[in-house]
Amino acid sequence: MTVHRGDMDGMNRRDFLRASGVTGAGALLAGVNTVGFGHVAQAATQAPLAVGSGILVVVTLYGGNDGLNTVVPYSDPRYQQLRPALAYSEAEVLTLGDGLGLNAGMAALKPLWDDGRLAIVRGVGYPAMNRSHFTSMDIWQSASPTSPSTSGWIGRWLDKQAQPSMAALSIGGTLPPMLVGERIAGSALPLGGLAVPNGDLRRTVRMLGRSAPAYHPLQAEAATAIEQLYDNAKATRAALATAVPGAPAAGASGLAQQLDVVARLIHASAPTRVYAVSLGGFDTHADEKSTQRALLAQLADALAGFLAQIEATVHRDDVTVLVYSEFGRRVPANLSQGTDHGSAGPAFVIGNRVQGGFHGAQPDLGHLVRDDLEVTVDFRDVYATLLERVLGSDADQVLPGWAGRLPLLRGN
Amino acid sequence: MTDERLAVARLLHRLAFGPAGQQYERALALGAAATAGELMLAVNATSAASDSAATPPPALPYLTLAGAGSRAAYEQARRDQERALKLWWLDRMTTTAQPLLERATWHWHGHWATSELKVRDCRLMLQQNETLRSTALGDFREQARLMLQDPALLIWLDGKGNRKGQPNENLGREFLELFALGDGNYTETDVREASRALTGWNVDMPAGTAVLNPQRFDQDFKTILGTRAAYDAPTLAYHVASQPACATHVARRWWLRFVSSTPATDAQLMPLVSAFAAERNSGRLALAVSGLLQDTSIELPLAKSPVEWAVGVLRVLDLPPTALPRAVQNGLLTDITAMGQQPFFPPNVSGWPSGRAWFTTTSAQARLRCTQRLVTRAPRWLATSKRNTRAAVLADRLGVPAWGTPTAAALADGSISARDALVIALNSPDYLVGV
């Protein structure tokens, strides 16, 4: 198992914040903060999300997923020549057409492809891709490849929302930089239940949740965590008590558990338009084949299970899922049966309104740039399309001047 | 005018693991400057011998599947070793006679951020830990040299098996980006060339040593950071660690862990950079940090990480972890994991987060559970104190300069027991975040 840098789920995303200066930005220091389940539950009953409001679920694959072994160009002899030990043959993949096949670990997504509900955007990246996990992930999450940005793309969208506090939620303990705006930060909801002390301590510990004018902002954060613990503990059970049919079994992967929370919130018509979940471990410098296949199976199984749950809700046609990673990997294998950091990779867009099939050109293995795939689609084309067509927002406010769009969604 | 209570509290919480017994009051009587001096002087051979005798590392025999007999037995033996290793280090941190050295070792563990999750060999994790301790306050170039040949790091970043012809770039890249220079201070060419310099290494698992295979080492010239030479791992370590960018990078990492969660300005960082730059000596860096911490005219907010907090609690309670019942030990390890930090298991190669990241609902819950688990009854010094002096006694025992109004109000609540007062104090923003 390779679980080092790729496993950037959770904690590590704080480093992106720090590295990109986001912690110094207004939103976090102004004390704009995570909201509790209590607020979500309350809001869900008071202002349920209307059917027809688009919902975006962003799945981040941390570590740099090997795109070439995800959507496999098995029919290209150069693929077999460039990474003989790592290459899959036609018999080993799920054929999609165009000489491409899906990694066999992703069998659970094949029916969605056959139904035309899975779009594969090929060759996604940005100009002169950076090979640092941290810088590249920061670029993806800020959508600002050329100059460091202090805000995330969903964060800037949040800044423009009339009721922003619950509009974007990350599932898990921490907040990815994608959800941090200039003015507003999205919210993080932990998995699992919460409890507060019993007896006399219940009342007195709660007093620690009050803020004091003399507190440094960091001390105020410590106080807020206690306040939220009390808020959330009270309401968690109510908000999440109602299982959506098809919930993953206990012991299912972390991603499946995160998506189950999303399914329950969507089922409860929580007023949330963007959910962020993640899966780590894709930094396959060594022994890649088995590790990646297992991870892709976790991804596909979790997504297929989630979409089946969503089918049982009134929001079944509102949900669109985006799956991306910070970069693909080098075309030739290294001698550890793995691959080093590379450039372009495929992104997946899934949902009932999605225009399935391939989008964008497959990078040409005959035109490598220093052993790397050429970028054929800029990731901002994908973001702009989702902002407009799923969230019904003006993409220009998030990606000023960006004109590229893709026909990823059907109808109007 | 120096706020002595604040200056001394900063020194004890940041260059050590917080006060035990009446250490804060004693240090206040000595004064901040003398307290800093004591912390420095305590790092010596006598203290080292006393640490080795008091908290010897666990015996960690080499584990093999064949030796264990079955997969299940092997996994169980490995989990037992991991548990023993974590408890040992927590114990060492709690009781050490040279807390500054241990604090610096803890810092370097987060800096080189190697995880047992991938290494899966506690012997090698302990070996790395001892390398970090032996160089924690010494020459960083030497530390870099030893680490580039450290078996655990070679496994963690795929340096093992990296060979001429098709170098694996993982170790080379992270060495430049995270360990030595920082992003933006090297090129992609430097990564490729540095990776060539790191070819040829493997790990002899039964022996637990790193070995260089000359046939797999790329002996040709490499151009790295503008210099052309036949670099190998040791010469690469010295070359890179001698770059000006390295002094700034290491100083920034220290600032973030010892001085303030707010990133330093260039001017603020300057005393640390210049102290470190001359000889790349981490002891001089620690001395410069101790000087900065005594300047109470500036706010230097710093949050305790979960391990720092837990060790601080164990010190206040005078509870070395190895003396705890097994079930409480297990609870302690579960709690710090829930807070997001276990020794020997950093989340990724960039180490643990800092600051606000530690203040989530999940971690608040785990801290409360942990203190309730450990504080089964009020210690004598608190139980025998008068109710109206409790807040002051707690401030002195915990090394808190002054309680904020919410904590003071909670501690003044008429209904709470002495034990509950201790739980409140240990979970207060005042104890969690120094300013």
Image (tube, helix red, strand yellow):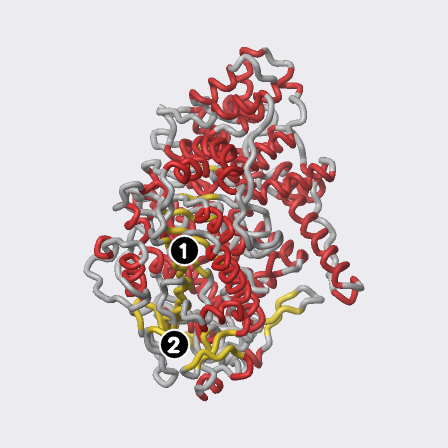
Decide which of A255, A150 is in the foreground and name it.
Answer: A255
Reply above or below: A145 against B58.
below
Which quarter of the image is occupied by the N terminus of chain B? top left
Q: Chain under label 2?
A: A
Total marks shown come to 2
Which quarter of the image is occupied by the C terminus of chain B? top left
**x, y (%) of residue A27?**
31, 41
Decide which of A362, A120 is in the foreground and name it.
Answer: A120
Q: Chain under label 1?
A: A
Name the side, left or right, on which A117 lies relative to B266: right
Residue B302 falls in image quadrant = top left
Q: Can residue A172 be seen in this snapshot?
A: yes
**x, y (%) of residue A186?**
37, 45
Reply above or below: B406 against B67.
above
Q: Mark 1 highlights which residue? A: A57
Residue A24 falls in image quadrant = top left
Reply above or below: B9 against B100.
above
Residue at the (49%, 53%) spot, across then down: A259
Q: Mark 2 highlights which residue? A: A372
Residue at the (43%, 33%) spot, across then down: A224
